[in-house]
Image (cartoon, helix red, strand yellow):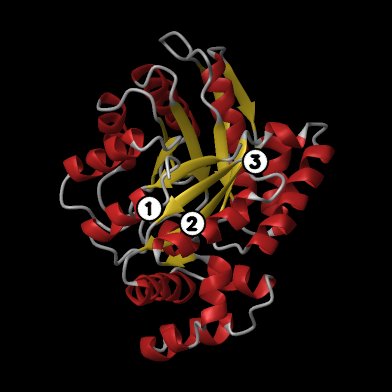
Amino acid sequence: MTDRDVHLPVAAQPTIESITDYTQTAEEKSYDCAWLPETWGRDGVTVLTAMAERTESIDIGSSILNTYSRSPALLGQTAATLQELSEGRFRLGLGPSGPVVIENWHGMEFGNPLKRTRETVEIVRKVLSGEPVDYDGEDFQLSGFRLRCDPPEPEPPVEVTGMGPKAVELAGRFSDGWHGIMLTPDGMKDRIEDIERGAELGDRDADDVQVTAGVTCCALDDPEQARALTRQHIGFYIGGMGTFYRDTLERQGYDEATEIYDSWQDGDRKRALELIEENILDDLCAAGDPETARTKLERYEAIDGIDAIAVSFPRGANDEQIRQTMDAVAPTN
């Protein structure tokens, strides 16, 4: 059976209480995991701590903490601490983010993101084992680091993001899980093949890699409003968050992605949104009235190899729209 997770709202929330309240609501509605994004507002670790303290059964996870702004040793300490605090419910989601975030916001060189992510995962696992960490990589060299507390039991899974075929293949080789976003059902099938190839290269079982499909959802009584909110969300990510999402869409056969990106970058956001036609929304998202949204999520659940659907929300959705959507597509419905 496919899990149903919730990816908490990306847009800034008025208080930490509002975020933890969403998490408690997700727990009440039997969602399996609440994933917290870290963008440019509150830091993720502090908020994850509050989420862990105010819930009892739902898993909590970072999706994502980037692999540049914290050292691998600190990420290992963080994962061990949150696993203890949550009594075994924490999942560490890592990813390189992109140059817009890493270079412009954190002032660091983006470098080789795949190599950095792999080395980070390897070091985090060594930290979580409780053994001394001696590591000689290309980006990181560590000697003698060791937790001064008991290692977590069980060790939390270390999951990664990635969008291109090579990144996903590497996820299959070394991670406990992979998170895919901005992918159609057919696009997810292609990336699952990358996971399987990577697992084979790493002499692993692909079933040991938890595959989570992030799907933007908006289920409202007013289906046109739901689709408008979702269209704006897709436009922002294709046009305003670097080139990764544009390239992902092109890889899936949507040649208009470049024109959407160029229009957004030129300041013509109206044109960019007009280029996101109905078929793109239908293929990528679950937007419309509640029945339509549930039906579109079921397309992903029917795919062999997907272990969880992470319901996310348009960045422009308000509290009422988020809660209506969360309720409409809850596992209990």
Q: Which residue is mark 3?
A: 138
Q: Is residue 110 visible?
A: no
First along the sequence among labels 3 and 1 = 3
- Foreground mark, 3 or 2, reads 2
> Viewer-proximal residue, 261 or 320?
320
Contact? badges 2 and 1 (CB < 8 Å): yes
Which label sits on residue 294?
A: 2
Residue type beneath disc 3: Glu
Q: Which residue is mark 1?
A: 328
Q: Position of residue 253 (x, y in %)?
A: 69, 76
> Viewer-proximal residue, 277 or 169?
277
Residue type beneath disc 2: Arg
- Foreground mark, 3 or 1, reads 1
Q: CA distance from mark 3 to mark 2?
A: 46 Å
Q: Position of residue 105 (x, y in %)?
A: 35, 59
Residue type beneath disc 1: Ala
Residue 212 placement: quadrant: top right
**Which residue occupies 61% across, 21% down?**
134
Q: Specify whether 253 is left or right of 52.
A: right
Which label sits on residue 259?
A: none
Q: Is residue 226 visible?
A: yes
Q: How many discs appear?
A: 3
Please state, as top left, top right, bottom left or bottom right, where the C terminus lies in the image.
Answer: top left
Q: Is residue 149 above or below residue 69?
A: above
